[in-house]
Amino acid sequence: MEALRLILLFIHLVGFALLLGGAVTQFLSGKFRINPAILWGSIIQLASGIALSAPLRGGGDHEPDPIKLGVKLLFAVLIFIMVFIPRKRDEVNKGHFIGIITLTVVNAAVAVFWH
């Protein structure tokens, strides 16, 4: 079971890298559009995050706080919606794009700092 958790965690980190890396790259280029890396990163983040939390519902000392999982799920769903809806537009609003980056970083901060 630990091997599966580690594989899912690795996939989750790859999704984070795609999402944040794709968004920062687009931001620095000056063209605010949803590229495939951002879209796939958000999908991978959401799916692997749900998969990571599912087997952990058995209880125990290392069980993550359900409120933390709910906050992370809320952020992941918001990010996915913010990415999925405007994915076919040539350009999105700069504030919308900054919101995607900010929510992604805040979601990572919740994962790291909330114990």
Image (tube, rainbow, N blue to C red):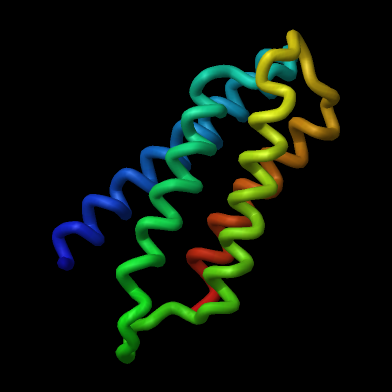
| In-front residue for pair 77/26 | 77
Q: Position of residue 50 (x, y in %)?
A: 44, 57
In this rendering, is residue 4 above or below 14? below
- Point out the image quarter for the N terminus: bottom left
Relative to residue 16, is residue 93 depicted above or below?
A: above
Q: Residue drawn 52% across and 78% down?
A: 66
Of all residues shown, which one is farthest toward the top? 90
Residue 34, percent from left and from top:
65, 21
In the picture shown, does residue 84 fall above or below 50?
Answer: above
Q: How many marks?
A: 0
Q: Is residue 104 left or right of residue 9?
A: right
- The front one of 53 and 35 is 53
Q: Is residue 34 above or below residue 4?
A: above
User: How far across and how far down the image is residue 102, in percent?
Assistant: 70, 46
Q: Is residue 5 left or right of residue 104?
A: left
Q: Could you tell me which residue is drawn at 43 percent across and 78 percent down?
A: 64
Residue 101 appears in which quarter of the rendering? top right
Residue sticking out furthest to the bottom: 61
| Residue at screen point 65% across, 43% down | 79
> Is 54 placed left or right of 110 in the picture?
left
Q: Position of residue 30 (x, y in %)?
A: 74, 15
Is 72 left, or right, of 93 in this rendering? left
Say which quarter of the image contains residue 109: bottom right
Residue found at x 85% / y 33%: 95
